[in-house]
Amino acid sequence: MNGAESLVRSLVDSGVDTCFTNPGTSEMHFVAALDHVAGMRSVLALFEGVATGAADGYYRMARKPACTLLHLGPGLANGIANLHNTKKANSSVVNIVGEHAETHRKLDAPLMSDIQGLARPVSHWVHTSERAEDVGKAGADAVQAARTGAGQIATLILPSDTAWNEGGEVHVAGEPPARDPMDPAMLEKAAKALDGEDTLLLLGGEALSAENLELAGKIAVKTGCKLLSEWSNQRLERGAGRVVINRVPYPIDIALKELEPYKKVVLVGARAPIGFFAYPGKPAVLTREGCEIVELAGASGDLDAVLDALVSATGADGCEPVLAERKEVDMPTGKNNPDTIAQALAATIPQDAIVVDESLTTGRAFFPDTAGTPPHTWINNCGGSIGYSLPVSIGCAVACPDRKVMALVGDGSAMYTVQSLWTMAREELDITVLIMSNGSYQILRGELTNVGVQNPGPRAVDMLSLDRPALDWVSMAKGMGVDGVRVEQADDLTRAIEHGLETKGPYLIEVVI
């Protein structure tokens, strides 16, 4: 058995059965091993940022890591933007990155680079295998590292000679390490802090499961505290029959106003609220001056146990949480705008849908109208590097083939990873893509104002406009095997979404705004 085969077998035996890949020469023995080892699904991407983003989405829904297969340093570099998002989301991924054989590294070949140096900022664990005999164990160790805490990124660098040499041995990852323990003193402090409408329970990470939101809802009924989530969440369960939770707003002025009433904030799986960016004359910390922050549990804690203990500590065991009611929504009419698009979504989101949201400025209106739709999962970009939603949708669809996936994405963001459409078509994934087509980087036009530029000139505006030529999304989609339609009216949008959801495989809707 060569090293590559021992690695594939070790990954499969450790529970990693999906690989998102864009391989090159140095990874060919891993590719060949896929034919010799049953149990590993390999999904080809035409760009490494699609592969890494898909692995993120896979973990968010499957709750187990997938692996990526990337070609040397440049391949890893192409995937780093979505690995940044993956790390911020606390998703678990195992990267396999090819490397030159040891004898070739000395020659400084054209593709030679510092792979470890590239990997470290977006990895929790980095290792280079130097012998075929050690590759299987390194693979099992990578899986073990990836399953630590809420989820980590492990990067295993695989020189080609260790892949082709004989002597490989199969190893299996151990049980995931225990989660961070809860501090009983902090539990008591948190329970005392939650004592009225001027207190906030701020949730993130796994605290946003349907079961944990129900526990948080009990605490809110008992104590009178308010509930909010972070602006960006790895995974949020919402819809009719679930506890309603809104997000800390993205626009800094609105966020400051929203958080100003709270004198005490208890954090469970969330960080204390801060702005996305620094702005002239505005604070970076979004809570009021003098606000008491109680950090009960971070993302790596056992949040199920933490919230269960907080229910008991606040005496909320017998309380019934307030749940969202099912609301039927009429088909909207008129031109597409954020409000009518929100109505169209509210009228069409199906039971158990997975909504991957990168709609940025347009999507800020979506949450209130969609709170009463059938139960569904809502996924956000936690790292802010755009071009995440189309790849993440691929991973979600691979992990949950029985659920409809809806990708909401701005036209500027979608161009970063447009190659995703090809993989959706090749794998026949059930994804309905809504491109919010306003012909600009609209979020950056707002940021010009936020940083104090009141009257941008024509060259500044030109740098934020996506025209000359205009993007033709339906043609681009068809060129990669995805059928689509362009809509300007809200009633046409509703019908297009319904058609997309009824269609087997991917479907793209260009939503002209």
Image (cartoon, grey):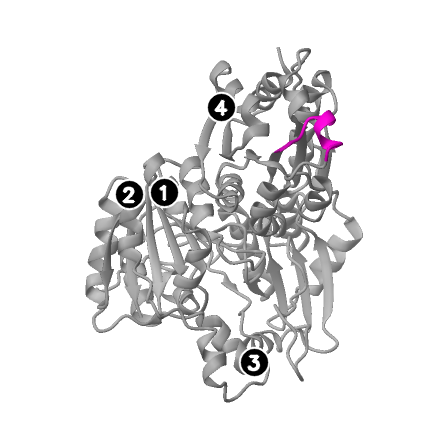
In-image side of 333 versus 145 (left or right): left
Residue 50 on image: x %, y %: 48, 45
Gap in Å between the C-alphas at discs 4 and 3? Answer: 48 Å
Q: Where in the figure is residue 464, as x and y percent of width and height? A: 46, 73
Q: Residues within 10 Å of mark 1 (few under 14, many from 20)?
A: many
Secondary structure beneath dot 1 equals helix
> Which tag, 2 or 3, sits closer to the chain's start?
3
Residue shown at 62% from the left, 66% from the top: 200
Q: The C terminus appears in which quarter of the rendering?
A: bottom left
Kindly identify the amino acid type of the residue bearing the numbered disc 2. Gly
Residue with the mark numbered 4: 40
**Total number of numbered discs in the rendering:** 4
Marking on residue 422 = 1
CB of mark 1 within 8 Å of CB of mark 4?
A: no
The answer to whether 482 is drawn above or below residue 372 in the figure is above
Q: Which residues are magenta?
A: 97-107
User: Does 275 appear above or below 26?
Assistant: below
Q: Residue 82 at what x, y percent from top left?
A: 55, 49
Q: Is residue 305 magenta?
A: no
- Residue identified by numbered label 2: 481
Q: CA distance from mark 1 to mark 3?
A: 37 Å
Q: Are marks 2 and 1 in contact (CB under 8 Å)?
A: yes
